[in-house]
Each structure stands twice: as structure tokens, then as C-alpha cells.
Amino acid sequence: MLKQTDISAQGQAAAAKPESDAASPAAIGSEIRDLRKAKRLTIKALSEATGISIGHLSEIERGISSPSIKALHDIARALGVTIGWFLHNAEESESAERRHIVRAGNRRSLRFSSGVADELLSPNLRGQLELLMSRFPPGAVGADVPYNHTGEEAGIVLSGALEMWIGDECFLLAEGDSFAFPSTTPHRYRNPGETEAVVIWAITPPSY
């Protein structure tokens, strides 16, 4: 939903797990591939950003090769997360549930430099739909300039207020108001109020 690059992922405990963690190369590789595709990066672009060869990245994404901790850090940095993002859902012991369910205390999240925080409500990014909960502190801006991308998005304001620009039009949304628009239309948003705004977003295809 947000396109800023200065972000830090939550879940530092997961990021600190040793290389011998139960997470399999296949599970980690699929998490890397899902996030790369959601960000609409080619494997060539990721290779250029990390210095890792295209061939090795392809092997990592397919679970053929296990990435070193340094390689995982380089990939995470290029994709705007910490390695905890890839390890978070990669433990095989709970994979059956985690394919479909996200427990309230087990959400992956990103915090942007603006103070806006996104929580991923959908189990992963490999389907056609992405579900997010966004928290906007008072005065927080989702993007400095309008941006657009492939797909559609819709949502509802759970609390607070959200000022939303869609094309040349500006709308003020309050608690209970909902919205929908093609993501190809330039858009941006901010919280104009004095309390936190909480918004649920549905985006297709995923663009985290």
C-alpha cells in the first residue's frame, strides 16, 4: 500500500534466529520470491541491488540453495525488510495453519519513517489478494506525492479520519466510511486528525 523505502520490519526476535533454525530453504525461498513479486521487482533488479548472481538468487527462491546469513541480510535490505520477514512464517511445524490463518499476535508488520505502520492480515503474498491494517498517527502522510500501480484497492476506515486524493479529487473519510478505486489512478492519503486513524485495505494484486 505504501511506497516509501525508509522502513524497518518488526519481529527482531525472529531475525535473530540462528542459521540452524527449523525454517527450510524452500520455505524461505518462497517468502523471498513472494515479496519480490509483490514489489514488482525482477530477479535481475534484485541481483543488481544485492550483488548476488541471478543464478544463485533463482536457486535460493526455488529452495535448491540455502542462503547465507549475509545473503539473507542483503536480500532483506534490498526488499525493505529485515530477515525476520522471511523467517516469520517459514517454520514447518505450523505450516498447515499458517497457509490460511493469521493469529492476531503473529502478524508481520512494517513501520515507515512517517510513523505509518502496516500489518499484513493475509497469510502470505502469493495469492491474488492482499489484506492490510494500516495505522496512521496524527498528521502522518502515506506518500509525499501521488503514485499509481497495477490493480485495484478498497477499504474501510475503522477509526479516526483519512484524507484521500484519487486523481484530482480529494475526499475526507470518517469512521465507518469505505472506498474503492483502480490503483492505476494516482492516489495518496494522510491523517488530518488529532487521533490515530486505523484503516483496513484490500489490494489486488499484492503490492506490499
Image: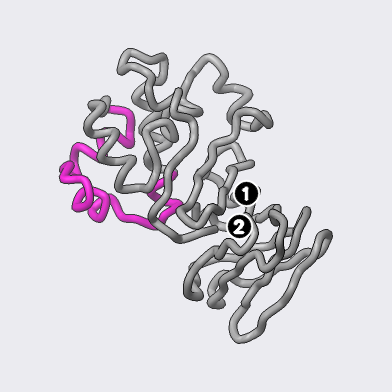
The answer, for residue 18, to whether it is visible in the render is yes
Circle 1 residue:
132
Q: Residue at x 66, y 55 (%)?
A: 201
Which of the two discs, 1 and 2, labels the residue nearer the N terminus? 1
Identify whether 52 is placed above or below 44.
above
Q: Where residue 175 sits: x, y (%)?
A: 81, 60
What stretch of residues is rendered in magenta? Answer: 35-64
**Residue, disc 2:** 203
Q: Residues within 10 Å of mark 1 (few under 14, many from 20)?
A: many
The label shown at residue 84 is none
Mark toward the viewer: 1 or 2: 1
Q: Considering only vertical position in the picture, is 73 above or below 7?
A: above
Residue 54 lies, in percent from the top left, at 19, 45
Occupied quadrant, residue 75: top left
Residue drawn where x is 71% and y is 65% of the image: 193
**Residue at (56, 48) in percent of width and height:** 117
> Is residue 48 on the magenta stretch?
yes
Quarter occupied by residue 109:
top right
User: Cα distance, mark 1 to mark 2?
Assistant: 8 Å
Question: Residue 97: where, in percent of width, then height?
Answer: 63, 24
| Residue 2 rendering spot, x and y as whole percentages | 51, 59
Which residue is pictured at 30% across the width and 18% down the height?
Answer: 19
Report the residue that reaches farthest toward the right: 176
